[in-house]
Image (cartoon, rainbow, N blue to C red):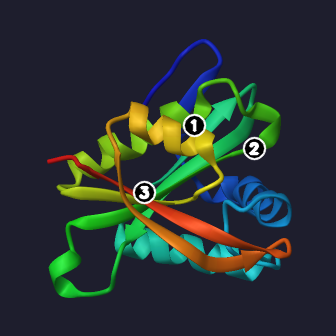
Amino acid sequence: MIKDAHIVIRKATVNDLEAILSIYNEAIANTTAIYEYAGFDQAYIEQWWDQKQHAQHPVLVAECEGTCAGFATYGVFRNRAAYHTTMEHSVYVNPDYQGRGIGRKLLQSIEQSARQSNVHVLIGGIDAENKVSIRLHEQEGFRQAAHLHQVAFKFDRWLDLVFVEKIIS
């Protein structure tokens, strides 16, 4: 857990699901951070939560001013036995709270959680136009592992996907 005067990183609870859903849906509607067209519904986020709990994959939230300002998690990178120590992580911050270091604190915290769970490699998939996220990951020791060209289509344009990786154990 990370605490400072304004931000607390903690394990999410079921009470955070509404805020997590809102953050997801804002990202779907307004960014290329998630390659989806339609927002998620309550049933989706409850199933997502149940899967995270069953797999013992962490969901962390950044609480700022009493509000869930962002979240981070990781999950299966590829569903094959030999990949069991490689996880793909996600970090999302409510746009009203961006620029306050919350993304960095969430990234550091999810990496710490992964290390404690004997994860060997963390992978991140980032839209190639998201220079802020790519730079943040590089500053935290991730390196670009792949650049996939025109693999998604959203907002009437082709999108490139960058994979970043970090060996953490």
Helix, strand, or loop for circle 3?
Answer: loop
Q: Pick whichever, 139 or 58, lies toward us.
A: 139
**Label 2 packing within 10 angstroms: few (<14), some (14-19), many (20+):** many
Tell me the amino acid under the disc marked 3: Pro
Q: Pick whichever, 3 or 40, lies toward us.
A: 40
Q: Is residue 59 above or below residue 95?
A: below
Give the image quarter of residue 131: top right
**Label 3 packing within 10 angstroms: few (<14), some (14-19), many (20+):** some
Q: Pick whichever, 146 or 122, lies toward us.
A: 146
The extreme front residue here reads 149
Helix, strand, or loop for circle 1?
Answer: helix
Viewport quadrant of the N terminus? top left
Which residue is disc 3 drawn over? 58
Which residue is disc 1 drawn over? 103
For image coordinates 50% across by 36% down, the residue present is 136
Q: Is residue 57 above or below residue 117?
A: below
